[in-house]
Amino acid sequence: MGVAEDFERCIAGGGIAVFPADTVYGLACAPGDAAAIARMYALKGRAPEKRSATMWFSADALPALPARTAAAIRSLVPGPLTFVVGELGIRVPDVPLLRGVGVAVLQTSANHAGGPDARRLADVPADIRAGADLVIDGGELPGTPSTVVDLTRYEDHGEWVVLREGAVAHAALEAVL
């Protein structure tokens, strides 16, 4: 079995995975599994009311979105961007190790809340690694988190806002959006 299959099996079984994204190491679990979500948030020390983005590993797997918004997202993924569309956070990373993963995951960075982002697996706190059901080493990562872009008003008004500066520059977004 390959890494992608192990990852899918872990998520489908209610597990939590530490994995390499295209930016920093992350934690992932099934988006509809309340027990796994509670465990993931507890490992991280994240407040339950703080939202996390849903990650897909292919743009083809994204949920139905309004046409203009969907076209904008598809033109920018895969890559180090997180999009906010209403209540939904959307992320499609470029992770060769996990290409072909067919399940969506709820994800957050693999660090303690407010702590430094993990560029290497060794940077992920030991208690988080020990508490995860699967730990995937993807080597050293760039270390800059994804840029977060709010597209909530994009469909009707063409408006977008960068909520967090990150790996993708504002100018690169302007060229597409």
Image (cartoon, rainbow, N blue to C red):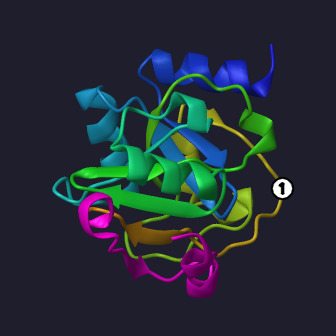
Tally of numbered tags: 1
Q: Residue furthest left?
A: 49
How far across and down, in percent of the image, does residue 133 sit? Answer: 55, 30
Residue at figure coordinates x 70%, y 57% from the top left: 22
Residue at figure coordinates x 27%, y 62% from the top left: 152
Q: Is residue 118 left or right of residue 29?
A: right
Specify whether residue 102 is painted magenta: no
Residue 130 image-quadrant placement = top right
Dot 1 lies on which element? loop
Q: Quadrant of the N terminus?
A: top right
Residue 122 image-quadrant placement = bottom right
Observer-nearest of 176 and 39:
176
Q: Is residue 21 left or right of residue 96?
A: left
How far across and down, in percent of the image, does residue 20 sit? Answer: 69, 50
Name the residue carrying label 1: 139
How far across and down, in percent of the image, does residue 111 sit? Answer: 50, 63
First to last magenta residue range: 153-177
Observer-nearest of 59 and 21:
59
The type of residue carrying mark 1 is: Gly
Residue 103 shows in the view: yes
Specify whether residue 155 is painted magenta: yes
Q: Residues within 10 Å of mark 1 (few under 14, many from 20)?
A: few
